[in-house]
């Protein structure tokens, strides 16, 4: 799996950093892989370790500490991370996501939302269940469809709102991964992290409306 970090400060997205090395150093000094030039960040603040089956972060004895999902982690002890985890390093907010590509690759337009998918396992490898797609109902990509051909598909602009659509056997589930904007299903706020989608459900995310379409194989 290919991971990336999304770095934000003052609610503004600054950059994305693909995690291509086994160890990614974070800190204020120039030798770090992710340089965060702010006095709230220690010169040698934290390290992220990327392996084949897991990813973890270690606080390297920083002055202000490192936080994962709001909790300070112990220094000098690797802490395992999961997709969508939110990190705080000084005044920076960092989220862990999969490295994805734009699902609407059109040279003539800039997509209103970005979408991508991860995991190379296809739907056929999971089951012989129904196929599904997301149709965009508003915005510059109105009328376009995103086929859900992977185990997990992520949709949404980083920093604003990102959801995942997961295929489990004969059903699809939606989860809010990150962002402060409320995700709505058929006009109602998403109530749980793993909500089953039904054919025709309408999803509202970051000002964009979509419809989930389920069809038999």
Image (tube, grey):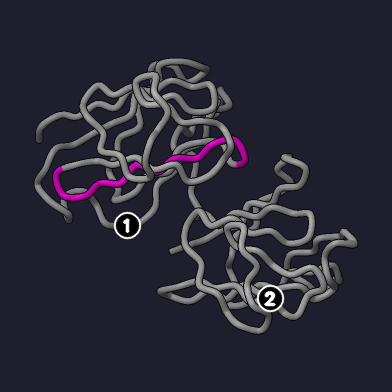
Give whichever of 30, 101 is nearer the camera.
30
Instruction: Report which quarter residue 155 is drawn in.
Output: top left
Find disc 1 in the rendering and name its residue.
120
Q: Position of residue 117 (x, y in %)?
A: 40, 47
Which label was assigned to residue 59? 2
* Badge 2 or badge 1: first in the primary sequence: 2
Give the side of residue 196 with respect to residue 112, left or right. left
Q: Position of residue 12 (x, y in %)?
A: 73, 40
Provide the secondary structure element on which disc 2 rests: strand
Name the residue: 48% across, 62% down. Answer: 2
Instruction: Report which quarter residue 40 is drawn in.
Output: bottom right
**Magenta stretch in the rendered image:** 159-170
Provide the secondary structure element on which disc 1 rests: strand
Q: Are marks 2 and 1 in contact (CB under 8 Å)?
A: no
Q: Position of residue 148 (x, y in %)?
A: 29, 39
Name the residue: 79% across, 54% down. Answer: 91
Would you say residue 204 sits in the magenta stretch? Answer: no
Give whichever of 176, 20 is nearer the camera.
176
3D distance between C-alphas at marks 2 and 1 = 32 Å
Would you say residue 167 sits in the magenta stretch? Answer: yes
Name the residue: 60% across, 62% down. Answer: 68
**Vertical order, 210 against 90 (above or below):** above
Dot 2 crowding, Cα within 10 Å, few <14, some 14–19, many 20+: many
Q: Depth-wise, is mark 2 or mark 1 nearer the camera?
A: 2
């Amino acid at each position: 799996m290919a991971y990336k970090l999304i770095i934000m400060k003052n609610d503004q997205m600054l950059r994305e950093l693909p995690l291509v090395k086994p160890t990614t150093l974070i800190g204020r000094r120039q030798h770090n892989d992710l340089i965060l030039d702010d006095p709230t960040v220690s010169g040698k603040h934290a390290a992220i370790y990327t392996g084949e089956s897991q990813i973890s972060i270690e606080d390297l004895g920083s002055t202000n500490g490192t936080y994962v999902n709001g909790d300070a982690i112990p220094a000098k002890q690797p802490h395992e991370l999961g997709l969508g985890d939110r990190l705080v390093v000084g005044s920076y907010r960092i989220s862990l996501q999969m490295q994805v590509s734009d699902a609407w690759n059109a040279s003539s337009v800039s997509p209103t939302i970005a979408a991508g998918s991860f995991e190379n396992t296809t739907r056929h490898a999971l089951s012989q269940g129904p196929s599904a797609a997301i149709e965009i109902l508003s915005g510059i990509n109105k009328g376009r469809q995103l086929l859900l051909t992977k185990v997990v598909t992520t949709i949404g602009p980083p920093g604003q709102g990102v959801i995942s659509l997961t295929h489990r056997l004969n059903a699809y589930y939606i989860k809010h991964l990150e962002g402060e904007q409320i995700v709505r299903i058929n006009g109602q706020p998403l109530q749980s992290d793993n909500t089953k989608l039904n054919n025709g459900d309408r999803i509202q995310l970051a000002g964009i409306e979509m419809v989930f379409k389920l069809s038999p194989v």
